[in-house]
Amino acid sequence: MAGKYIWSALVGSIAVAYVCNNVISDRKIFGGTTPSTVSRKERWLETDKKFQAWPRFGGPPVVMNSVSRQNFIVESGLDQ
């Protein structure tokens, strides 16, 4: 009995969050535009090429976090 209320509340909250995100971010009801540094694919490709071209000296393999551009050491299970 309580499961249907929990499920419907969860679905309803996801729907409200989607509508709010769509109206505020995508339709830009408060004005503004998307900056060219985000919207232009050419700039993104050049920036990514620059970050991938950084020289690395020694050390273990790393994976670059594409959001914060921080490197994290990759631990393999075979080294243990």
Image (cartoon, rainbow, N blue to C red):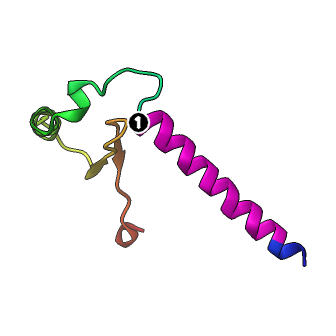
How many residues crowd around disc 1 within 10 Å: few (fewer than 14), some, or many (20 or more)? few
Q: Which residues are magenta?
A: 5-26
Relative depth, front residue between 26 and 76: 26
Q: Residue at the location (41% across, 21% down)?
A: 31
Instruction: Answer whether residue 1 is magenta in the image.
Output: no
Instruction: Answer whether residue 21 is magenta in the image.
Output: yes
Indicate left or right for 12 with 72 as reference. Answer: right
Q: Looking at the figure, which quarter contains the C terminus?
A: bottom left
Q: Residue at the location (12% across, 40% down)?
A: 45
Magenta stretch secondary structure, dominant:
helix
Relative depth, front residue between 31 and 72: 31
As displayed, is residue 55 above or below residue 72?
above
Find residue 38 and report its horizontal and vertical position in percent.
25, 32
Residue marked by disc 1: 27
As displayed, is residue 73 above or below residue 40?
below
Q: Residue at the location (49% across, 39% down)?
A: 23
Find residue 3 and report its horizontal and vertical position in percent.
83, 75
Q: Residue at the location (36% across, 67% down)?
A: 79
Indicate left or right for 62 with 18 as reference. Answer: left
> Looking at the rendering, which quadrant does residue 78 occupy?
bottom left
Indicate left or right for 5 with 38 as reference. Answer: right
> Looking at the rendering, which quadrant does residue 56 occupy?
top left
Q: Looking at the figure, which quarter contains the N terminus?
A: bottom right
As displayed, is residue 41 above or below residue 1?
above
Find residue 75 and report its horizontal and vertical position in percent.
38, 59
As displayed, is residue 7 above or below residue 31?
below
Secondary structure category for the residue under label 1: loop
Type of amino acid at the residue the image marks with label 1: Arg
